[in-house]
Image: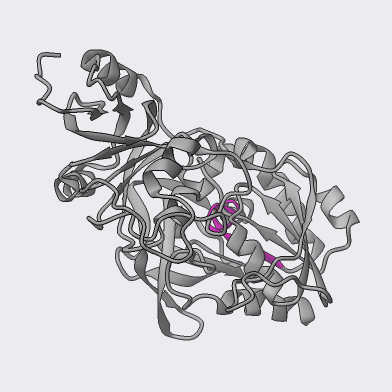
Amino acid sequence: MTQTLLPGCTGVLALADGTILQGFGCGATGTALGEVVFNTAMTGYQEILTDPSYMSQILAFTFPHVGNTGTNVDDIEQMGGGSDTSARGAIFRDLPTDPANWRSDSGLDAWMKRRGVVGLAGVDTRALTKAIRDRGAPHAVIAHDPDGRFDLEALVAQAKAWTGLVGLDLAKDASTLQSFQWDEALWDWPEGHPRVDAASKSVVVIDYGVKRNILRALASTGCAITVVPATTSAEDILARNPDGVVLSNGPGDPAATGVYAVPEIRKLVDSGKPLFGICLGHQMLALALGGKTIKMDQGHHGANHPVKDLTTGKVEIVSMNHGFTVDRDSLPDAVMETHVSLFDGTNCGIALKDRPVFSVQHHPEASPGPSDSLYLFDRFAALMDG
């Protein structure tokens, strides 16, 4: 690789096509391999970087100023682990700023160091976003060395050799290893996260990489929650006699995770229990009902996506984070489309016509993002009450 590093360069992004973006390293030192995607949210970077759905991905933030609210222990979305089970790297237009927020207990740069998230700043994120939009999400290696020593040829070769997310089951790694109970509800001023003492319904959540605020939103509807590993059988779930089952969000290719998950989801559908799928859970429910999924060129990542609820006619602004989509043309007659993206017309929700089963592609708990879709948790609770 003949490209000369600029003076003061301590971080690079090496794309599989040989492109090298130079800048200033931040966060953890070392390298990280993944698919580069952009996120259009203007806030909530800590929730974004800890979302397990970003596993094996490198995030480019389109909003230029990141870091001013710092980080804290409450806004972590994944249940455990660091960058191995969430975003591997982060790309910023400007170096992260010092925190200036009463909830902050650490700056973003120090927090990224502790979590093992490799950062790169000083990059033209607008140009990178346009490239991803036009040519798709590239495979890349992000690297940070305070001494500015990089083997660019080796980094490009590593990015080029990576096979990508297609065919990759990541849910097993993002999932809990054993079942546990959850009773923490959504944040409420001034108490913070209250505990649900008297629950009226019981829900089993299959953890493919679940976010904490999905569990909190469910608890806030009066549910006693049991979280179980991704590989749990339908028989074990039904033996708990839940009022409903949630298929959680998560990373990776739904068809790959579906090898072991889809047969169990079919059994849950046949049981007649109310079923609610979110993101990866939505995609695998579609597979279980006879549909197909497709890898998207750049995916949907952000907190400003317009989605229409076809059952009400209302348009919601929602949070999204997915690189695969349900092929609406593959859905059987027993399945109706309930939500659609107003950005590109892709499917964002389905429901069975004759059973209490539905799912959405977007994140109704948001975190970060608007709360337009929180009603979906109430819709699920109503199905269980019914």
Residue 20 falls left or right of residue 245: left
Q: Who is closer to the viewer here, 194 or 21?
A: 194
Residue 276 part of the magenta-drawn span: yes
- Which x, y percent locates residue 100? 36, 62
- Which x, y percent locates residue 128? 19, 44
Residue 305 sits above or below residue 138 on the image: below
Which quadrant of the figure contains the C terminus? Answer: bottom right
Residue 56 can be seen in this image: no
Residue 103 can be seen in this image: yes
Q: Who is closer to the viewer here, 171 or 146?
A: 146
Residue 297 falls left or right of residue 326: left
User: Which residue corresponds to the image point at 73% horizontal and 69% vertical from the top-left?
Assistant: 274
Residue 178 sits above or below residue 245 on the image: above
User: Which residue corresponds to the image point at 75% horizontal and 65% vertical from the top-left?
Assistant: 183
Residue 368 part of the magenta-drawn span: no
- Which x, y percent locates residue 311? 51, 82
Marks counted in the figure total 0
Q: Who is closer to the viewer here, 80 or 334?
A: 80
Q: How is the image coloured?
A: one colour
Q: What is the quadrant of residue 192 in the picture?
A: bottom right
- Which x, y percent locates residue 27? 37, 37
Magenta residues?
Answer: 275-284
User: Which residue corresponds to the image point at 10% horizontal and 26% vertical from the top-left?
Assistant: 6
Which quadrant of the figure contains the N terminus? Answer: top left
Residue 100 sits above or below residue 98 on the image: below
Q: Who is closer to the viewer here, 150 or 237?
A: 150
